[in-house]
Amino acid sequence: MNSNTPLLDTICSPADLKELNPKQLIQLSKELRQDIIDVVSETGGHLGASLGVIELTVALHKVFDTPQDIIIWDVGHQAYPHKILTGRREQMRTIRTGGGLSGFTKRTESEYDPFGTAHASTSISAGLGFSVAKKALGEPGCAIAVIGDGSLTGGMSFEGLNHAGELGYKLIVIVNDNQMSIDPPVGALSEHLRKLGDSIRSAQDRNKSREHNETTSRTFFECLDFEYLGPIDGHCVNTVADILAKVKDDDYNKPVVIHLITEKGKGFKPAEESFDKLHGVGKFDKKTGKSLQSSSNVPTYTKVFSTSLIQAARKDPKIVGITAAMPSGTGLNQFAKEFPTRTFDVGLAEQHAVTFAAGLAAGGLRPFAAIYSNFPTKSI
């Protein structure tokens, strides 16, 4: 038992959350956040994303009947609190080690992981598949897809939204809008979400009247025949739980989008103040957030690539750079500082990035599409 986490110590499965009162949900969220900081400071891993969905994770497992109800975490970077609440807390210090827990959701690891996720933008399509399958087989439960605003820039998410809007099956899509993937998200949809989130207003007030859609401008999601609820403060656990309970109980005849405003790295000051919100970290001092890993004087591959590309671009005005939402990870952030009009961040859309580069090349430019090699294999 941990004196710092007395309530969390009593949670062995999602069933243990069912009788918790509103005060206890707030306390559990605080303890869960601290537990993740403690664990990741020793193991390394994806910290910022997990800290940003603490309240959402608690609310989901409080309201829904998992694993009968399906929760799909897009990408899976944010799945650490989900793992802890679904009986894997004692194994968390084995995460991302041989024979230990996966850093993402994994079907063979737990019945609470219904779908394996690693790269982005797949949750809506998968969730729709579960919804259709449940109806076809006459099985109870519903499907919930949790997708970040950055992942919405991926083309596959648009394909899933388009198909779900046409079919009209009950599918709950939770947009975790923190205005941050690994780098700040880009694109017209990101700007649309930003405008929607400029003022946090009650989804309950917004939806008191079904006349709403006829009297105000429609959101992108409503144009695709989704019910839209939000924006909502994603760090108010009881508000989130109330909205989820309403959506679960209401007999919607269409898919639903719940738009949550969250902060990546929430509750850990070093993460909140970091440019990448401490997205992926090695071992660190949990008081200061400073890395405990030794530094090297050997230049990284990313640094060598970035420097070489900048030098070449100074001589050749036809060279342009393309990144799929990872300017800092690929080194194109430095290229962009010197050549802002020759740098293109297309969002988490590797298929578009490669085809866009082909068009640029056919049109006479010399594009360099800098993408982690394993990402296109999962996207194309």
Image: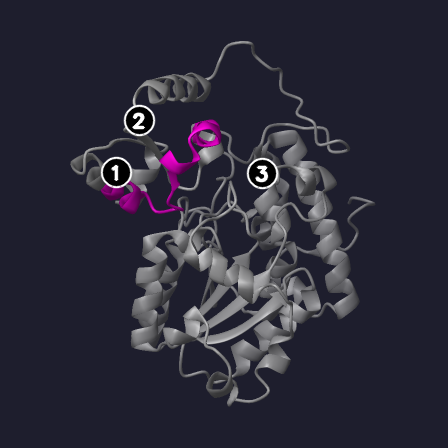
Q: Looking at the picture, how far across and down is residue 213, in whole percent?
A: 48, 83
Q: Residue at x 31, y 26 (%)?
A: 317
Find disc 3 in the rendering and name its residue. Answer: 276
Local secondary structure at mark 1: helix
Local crowd at mark 3 within 10 Å, few (<14), some, or many (≥20)? some
The numbered mark at residue 317 is 2
Q: Looking at the picture, how far across and down is residue 250, in whole percent?
A: 52, 83
Magenta-drawn segment: 331-357
Q: Residue at x 58, y 72 (%)?
A: 244
Q: Are marks 1 and 3 in contact (CB under 8 Å)?
A: no
Please state which amino acid type lies under the numbered disc 1.
Answer: Ala
What's the distance in space between the residues labelled 1 and 3, CA to CA? 26 Å
Q: Is residue 46 left or right of residue 252?
A: right
Total count of labels: 3
What's the distance in space between the residues labelled 1 and 2, CA to CA? 16 Å
User: Looking at the rendering, in which quadrant would you find the C terminus?
Assistant: top left
